[in-house]
Amino acid sequence: MKVDFNGVTTNFDSIPLGGFFMFDLSRGGSFGICVAVADNKRAAISLPTSTSREKRLGWLQVGGLNQTFIHFPGAVLRPVLTSVAEAGSSAGSVLICAGQKRFIRGYENNHSRTFNVETGLVEELSPHDVVYFTQWNVGLLVDQSFEEIYRFPPDTED
């Protein structure tokens, strides 16, 4: 029998920078993006869930990541084109497109850091030719169809 599972079970240190993953498996699962902070120390942008108080922010998490993870090496992030906004007109962990680069913000205490989505590294943004997407999805391409894994902002739990 074949099993159609596009994830890889692993530990946090094996997830590449910029990798999309699932964690908190014992609580039904949360999602995140692997990034690097000061001195290339690995961290996670922990994305909001339907039960999060704040659904517009992804929080930086450093340490305490000793559990089993599911890494999705083939994950694709797609902006919702109708959610486009001019730079500066929106806050939160929006997808930021500047030229050919894509960024996301992670929050820690009262400040944010901007990370390149593909490399997972902190980068400064050019203030020119920048657009924000306030909604985006992460999924897998299966048989030429996009199968959603995560939606930002998450739906509100009823």
Image: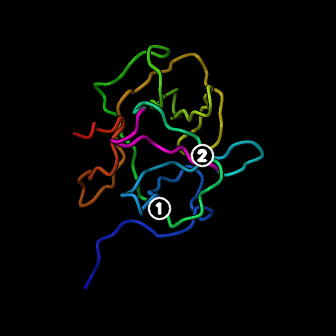
The spot of residue 40 in percent (x, y) is: 73, 48
Judge whether residue 90 is colored magenta.
no
Q: Badge 1: few (under 14), some or many (20 or more) residues near its Cα, within 10 Å?
A: many
Residue type at the position of mark 1: His
| Image quadrant containing the C terminus | top left
> What residue is drawn where x is 52% and y is 34%?
104
Q: Nearer the viewer, residue 106 or 50?
A: 50
Q: Which residue is mark 1?
A: 71
| Image quadrant containing the N terminus | bottom left
Does residue 140 appear to the left or right of 8 in the view shown?
left
Residue lying furthest bottom: 1
Q: Which mark is residue 61?
A: 2
Q: Which image quadrant for residue 67?
A: bottom right
Q: Is residue 87 above or below residue 121?
A: above
> What residue is drawn where x is 29% and y is 72%?
4
Disc 2, SS: strand
Per the rendered image, the range of residues in magenta is 43-53
Q: Is residue 150 above or below residue 81?
A: below
Give the distance between the C-alpha atoms of the residues marked 2 and 1, in whole angstroms.
17 Å
> What residue is drawn where x is 60% and y is 32%?
114
Question: Does label 2 or label 1 sit earlier along the sequence?
Answer: 2
Does residue 125 appear to the left or right of 136 in the view shown?
right
Q: Which mark is residue 144?
A: none
Q: How is the image coloured?
A: rainbow
The spot of residue 31 in percent (x, y) is: 43, 50
Q: Which image quadrant for residue 60?
A: top right
Q: Is residue 15 above or below residue 62?
A: below
Q: Is residue 105 above or below residue 38?
A: above
The spot of residue 129 in percent (x, y) is: 51, 18
> What residue is drawn where x is 44% and y is 14%?
89
